[in-house]
Amino acid sequence: MGSTASTGNGTWRNWGGTVRVRPARETAPASVDELAAAVRRAAEDGMPVKAVGTGHSFTSIAATDGLLIRPHLLTGIRHVDRAAGTVTVEAGTPLKRLNLALAREGLSLTNMGDIMEQTVSGATSTGTHGTGRDSASLAAQIRGLELVTADGSVLTCSAKENPDVFAAARIGLGALGVVTAITFSVEPLFLLTAREEPMPFDRVCADFDQLYAENEHFEFYWFPHTGNTNTKRNNRSAGPERPVPRFKGWFEDEFLSNGVFHAVNLVGRAVPASVPAIARISSRALSARTYTDIPYKVFTSPRRVRFVEMEYAVPREALVETLRELKAMVDRSPLRVGFPVEVRTAPADDITLSTASGRDSAYIAVHMFKGTPYQGYFTAAERIFTAHEGRPHWGKIHTRDAEHLSRMYPRFGEFTALRDRLDPERRFRNDYLRRVLGS
Ligand SMILES: Cc1cc2nc3c(=O)[nH]c(=O)nc-3n(C[C@H](O)[C@H](O)[C@H](O)COP(=O)(O)OP(=O)(O)OC[C@H]3O[C@@H](n4cnc5c(N)ncnc54)[C@H](O)[C@@H]3O)c2cc1C
């Protein structure tokens, strides 16, 4: 399943090609009992344990040299509760399968990210988000969780039951236990009208507060080396449904956004000097369009061109200044950046280590085509983001450590205290967690 692969010699690698590890043991449990038994056996053998999703994280957050728990036999819908407006799914269920099943039931999540390849547990564990004025990340749509903890016991939590665990485990970084089921809040299927439109960078910056306030979901892509952006506004609509016509959809979403985009990135990688000219053409390739469809068809699209990514959440009011600094940095540097910068928002939420924990946030994501040196760009961008009290996406490249992050998250100590209680022997340890959480 998914986009990760065993290469035949027992190696696990992630989607972005930034992580490659060889776990000592692998298992694909088909039930919670099997999973709990595997965790207990690993404990007896003194082995670290890591559950993975589809490897779409760019950081080594999912890496282990111990027991690797694969998700593909722990999938499917457990229960739909229409009266409560919830759906309970097995933790390894891919978001795609969840969205399609919900649509068949006439239901939908409220908000989602750009793609739906990830598993529900993998996506929520790192705080995967889309863009929203009032609606937040996938994890913020969780109503209940079931997890197997380090001693092999099953723990359930919600706002009412074990609320301290619920506060942290919705974005648990794989550090608190293995999630086995998630209950999401759902609502009756609705329609969104998407308006995609090119707009000058200076105008988006000048009008950002208004664009944000007037739209339920506003986002834009800025093309480095140009003053151009593509904006996207999604708002609920009474219909009628007006999907992108099949050929136009294929031409723009597959041919231009994936096929041609891949080819021009190959050219840019081979001849970096061509990147600014390519960026000027790419930024004008997509014309304005309006369509109305069910949520997952509006929020998500295929991303076949492989890249590496860093994304930071800054306080929303700091967005425009941060972005202008990023543009000035690119303009005066010798960097050649062929991938657009994505900008999204989220309202404050109440999850301990959510990038939007306790503050209205704006996300800025920088990308580089896979195989292109990215360190210089990301280092310079990260310096700007951290100067604005940015919090890095847990699943995307960053260099922050526990000392720094404990200053960025007022509730950091709450998370580590819970980890001390639930996993005192650090059964779910790996090098990434040691860096970002300490010990
Ligand atoms: C093409 C692409 C598009 C993306 N788009 C977005 C986007 O729009 N918005 C956004 O915010 N992010 C986005 N991301 C990042 C991605 O959503 C996150 O990195 C996400 O965590 C990946 O999910 P996964 O299923 O691949 O999990 P993995 O990367 O395999 O694992 C992530 C973490 O989840 C943990 N985990 C997995 N399963 C369990 C479990 N059962 N119990 C406990 N812990 C578990 C792992 O241990 C690890 O810590 C994108 C990434 C790519 C490559």
Image: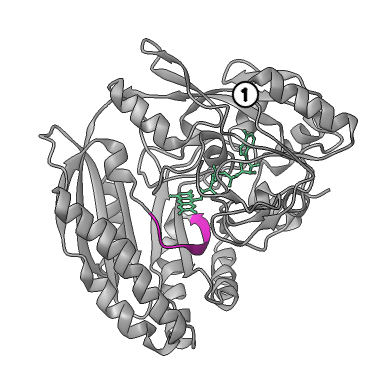
Q: Residue at x 13, y 36 (%)?
A: 241
Residue 358 lies, with reference to residue 289, above or below; the image says above
**Residue farthest along the top direction in this orientation:** 83
Q: Nearer the viewer, residue 243 or 330?
A: 243
Q: Residue at x 50, y 37 (%)?
A: 349
Please state which amino acid type lies under the numbered disc 1: Ala
Residue 432 as seen in the image, left or right of residue 379: right
Residue 148 lies, with reference to residue 373, above or below; the image says above
Q: Is 139 part of what is drawn in magenta?
A: no
Q: Residue at x 61, y 30 (%)?
A: 167
Residue 314 lies, with reference to residue 44, above or below; the image says below
Quarter of the image where one finds residue 20: bottom right
Where is residue 145 drawn, in percent x and y? 58, 23
Where is residue 23 drawn, in percent x and y? 75, 47
Residue 323 as seen in the image, left or right of residue 154: left
Q: Is 305 part of what is drawn in magenta?
A: yes
Instruction: Report the magenta residues as a range.
Output: 303-314
Determine which residue is flagged by label 1. 30
Label 1 residue SS:
loop
